Amino acid sequence: MNEIFSPQPSLFISHGAPNIVLYPSETRAFWQDLSAKWRRPSALLVMSAHFPAARPTFETGGHPGMIYDFGGFEPELYDMTFPAPGAPALAEKAFELADAAGLSAAISKGRGYDHGTWVPLRIMFPHADIPVATLSVQPRETGAHHLALGRALAPLRQEGVLIVGSGGATHNLSAYFGGEDTPPWARNFNDWLCERIEAGDVDAVAAWEKGPDALLNHPTPEHFLPLPFAFGAGGPGARGRRLHHAFIGPISLDAYSFG
């Protein structure tokens, strides 16, 4: 077993569709290899695009169940489990950090793992032996708010906690289900995003709506906002590094590390 690495980076992953867990792909292979490149975290703190709330909400349950928050996919997906234990102490500490930063945090108990959490983690950490705390995205809040939330939680990385934002670098499902190939508007936004992240331009990422065709790529913001959260969790002055690049039609599956 690898020793605990302190500090851990923060990570943004584009989680794609739930059935990515079933079939070989470049993204699935990337997830499989990713945990081998970093030392074992003490715990995981995951913001998923599929856990929306009005306030930063931290799940404190010790034994989260499964949430199959999708329909129309292969039947075997509904039998999959990810039995990783919860991380109540981590969730409580993260809540205290967020609340101390004036972010009006809240606590929940009893919420399971949605597919934005369990699908990538099932591939990245198949032994399901690392405790996981989850927190909400706040779709009515700004990129700057999520950046500030990430910065408030950044000290947890010093304790070996891997902070993960799980969403999508681009996420226009109407275009995807319309059968489009990767259109120029998706590539343009994705390229702009990579340039701004790798330049350390956190202000541009926080004000992401000003990017090229931003609202076409994200008609709703919940899949983008875990990205400024992860950027903020990298700490002041952090630059991002793109770890993975792939498209499925208009959907970018890019991943970044920070810190």
Image (spheres, grey):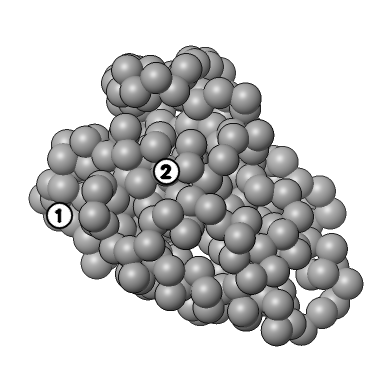
Position of 252 with respect to 195 (left or right) is right
Disc 2 on helix, strand or loop?
A: helix
Instruction: Note whether 186 is above or below 168 in the view shown.
Output: below
Horizontal placement of 183 versus 188: left or right?
right
| Figure check: 72 above or below 188 | above
Point 18% across, 56% down: residue: 39
Q: Residues within 10 Å of mark 1 (few under 14, many from 20)?
A: few
Q: Quadrant of residue 214?
A: bottom right
Disc 2 marks a residue whose amino acid type is Leu
Task: Tell me residue 32's x, y (percent).
Answer: 40, 66
Horizontal and vertical percent position of residue 252: 60, 71
Identify the residue at horizontal 52%, vertical 45% (top origin).
Answer: 143
The span from disc 1 to disc 2 (Cα, nearest Å) is: 30 Å
In the picture of the structure, the residue carrying the numbered disc 1 is 2
Which residue type does callout 1 highlight?
Answer: Asn
Is residue 101 shown to the viewer in this render? yes
Task: Residue under label 2, please give it.
Answer: 147
Residue sitting nearer the eye, 139 or 17: 139
Compare residues 105 and 115 and report the one nearer the observer: 105
Does residue 251 appear in the picture of this structure?
no
Task: First in sequence, mark 1 or 2: give its number.
Answer: 1
- Quadrant for the C terminus in the image: bottom left
How many numbered discs? 2
User: Residue 63: x percent and y percent?
Assistant: 46, 24
Q: Nearer the viewer, mark 1 or mark 2?
A: 2
Q: Position of residue 231 (x, y in %)?
A: 37, 52
SS category of the residue bearing label 1: loop
Q: Is residue 157 left or right of residue 227?
A: left
Name the disc covering residue 80, or none.
none
